[in-house]
Image: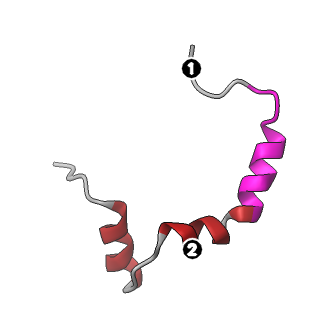
């Protein structure tokens, strides 16, 4: 059976380190900017 776990706990088990949300956002900032540009004008989500 699938068990849901907190993503922070799973990342710590995999990497051996605590990873903060701000650090992850900083790491992926360029990707987020690119994705936002690519999706400009598109509807996000379902109707």
Q: Earlier in the sequence, mark 2 or mark 1?
A: 2
Secondary structure found at label 1: loop
Q: Which residue is mark 1?
A: 46
Which residue appears at 70% of the width and 24% of the height? 43
Judged left or right of residue 2, residue 6 is right
Judged left or right of residue 5, residue 28 is right
Can you tell which mark lies on residue 23? 2
Which residue appears at 36% of the width and 62% of the height? 7
Residue, far left:
1
Which residue appears at 82% of the width and 35% of the height? 40
Judged left or right of residue 41, residue 5 is left
Q: Is residue 18 magenta?
A: no
Above or below, 32 relative to 25: above
In space, the residues marked 2 and 1 are separated at their CA atoms by: 30 Å
Residue 19 sits in quarter: bottom left
Can you tell which mark lies on residue 24? none
Q: Looking at the magenta stretch, what is its main secondary structure?
A: helix
Residue 37 rendering spot, x and y as whole percentages: 83, 44
Callout 1: 10 Å neighbours few (<14), some, many (20+)?
A: few
Above or below, 36 relative to 13: above
Please report the bounds of the magenta region as a residue range: 30-42
Residue depth check, mark 2 versus mark 1: number of the one nearer the observer: 2
Residue 22 sits in quarter: bottom right
Q: Quadrant of the C terminus?
A: top right
Callout 2: 10 Å neighbours few (<14), some, many (20+)?
A: few
Residue 35 rendering spot, x and y as whole percentages: 75, 48
């Amino acid at each position: 059976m699938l068990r849901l776990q907190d993503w922070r706990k799973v990342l710590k088990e995999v990497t051996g380190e605590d990873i903060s949300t701000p650090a992850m956002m900083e790491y992926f900032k360029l990707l987020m900017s690119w994705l936002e540009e690519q999706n400009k004008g598109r509807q996000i989500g379902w109707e």
